[in-house]
């Protein structure tokens, strides 16, 4: 799997030794916590405000995550209702080493509900004609881009396939 095809991840982390379970693999709860965080980003954007997790509809762990893996979370809105947003999250681990194998390690689907200031369900904002059906994401061509690779030489980016080399500063694209 080439992560360049996936685009920029919603969230990208490297698990540390304190994230391991008693057997030395990364804990499933660590993965689930970050799946929820990644899914919340497009849900909150679509809700244009507070959105709370009401269900983890599914979560399948396909392969283990290891300490030191570069773990990328890709979150996409797959459905919306009057007050709800359903988000699919795919998680990939880039194994460290010369080969830098990439494995799809987890898939999950979560549902969020938009809430008001009193934490009661509220309707999602209407999508007007001409507006995008999904809110802008970091890394889009017409939106601000902030990259963790700012100032890094191109040879340092070679092992980081999901960071676009043209997104190296905070800027508003034309």
Image: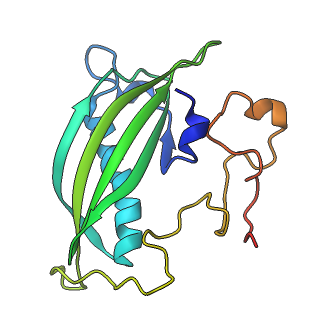
Work out whether 110 lies above or below 68.
Answer: below
Q: In this view, does 128 lie above or below 55?
A: below
Coloring scheme used: rainbow
Residue 158 appears at what percent x and percent y? 74, 29
Give residue 102's position: percent from left, percent from top: 50, 23
How many dots with numbers? Answer: 0
Image point (40%, 51%), residue name = 75
When asked about the image quadrant of residue 58, the answer is: top left
Residue 151 position, x and y percent, is 81, 47
**Would you place residue 57 above or below residue 70 in this image?**
below
Residue 18 shown left or right of residue 21 in the figure: right
Q: Which of 109 and 119 is in front in this view?
A: 109
Tell which residue pokes out farthest to the front in this image: 129
At horizontal 62% and vertical 57% (from top left) the residue drawn is: 139
Quarter the C terminus occupies = bottom right
Left or right: 156 in relation to 139: right
Q: Which residue is drawn at 36% across and 28% down?
A: 105
Q: Residue at x 49, y 80 (%)?
A: 131
Residue 147 appears at what percent x and percent y? 67, 52
* Left or right for 92, reference 79: right
């Amino acid at each position: 799997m080439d992560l360049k095809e996936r685009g920029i991840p919603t969230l990208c982390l490297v698990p540390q030794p304190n994230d391991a379970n008693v057997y030395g693999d990364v804990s499933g709860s660590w993965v689930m916590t970050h799946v929820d965080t990644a899914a919340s980003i497009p849900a909150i954007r679509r809700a244009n405000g507070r959105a709370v997790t009401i269900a983890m509809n599914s979560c399948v762990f396909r392969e283990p995550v290891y300490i030191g893996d570069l773990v990328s979370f890709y979150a996409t809105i797959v459905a919306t209702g009057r007050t709800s947003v359903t988000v699919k999250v795919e998680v990939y681990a880039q194994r460290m080493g010369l080969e830098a194998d990439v494995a799809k390690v987890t898939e999950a689907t979560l549902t969020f509900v938009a809430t008001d200031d009193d934490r009661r369900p509220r309707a999602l904002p209407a999508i007007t004609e001409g507006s995008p059906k999904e809110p802008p994401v970091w890394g889009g061509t017409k939106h601000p881009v902030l990259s963790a690779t700012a100032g890094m030489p191109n040879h340092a980016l070679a092992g980081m396939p999901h960071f676009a080399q043209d997104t190296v500063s905070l800027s508003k694209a034309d």
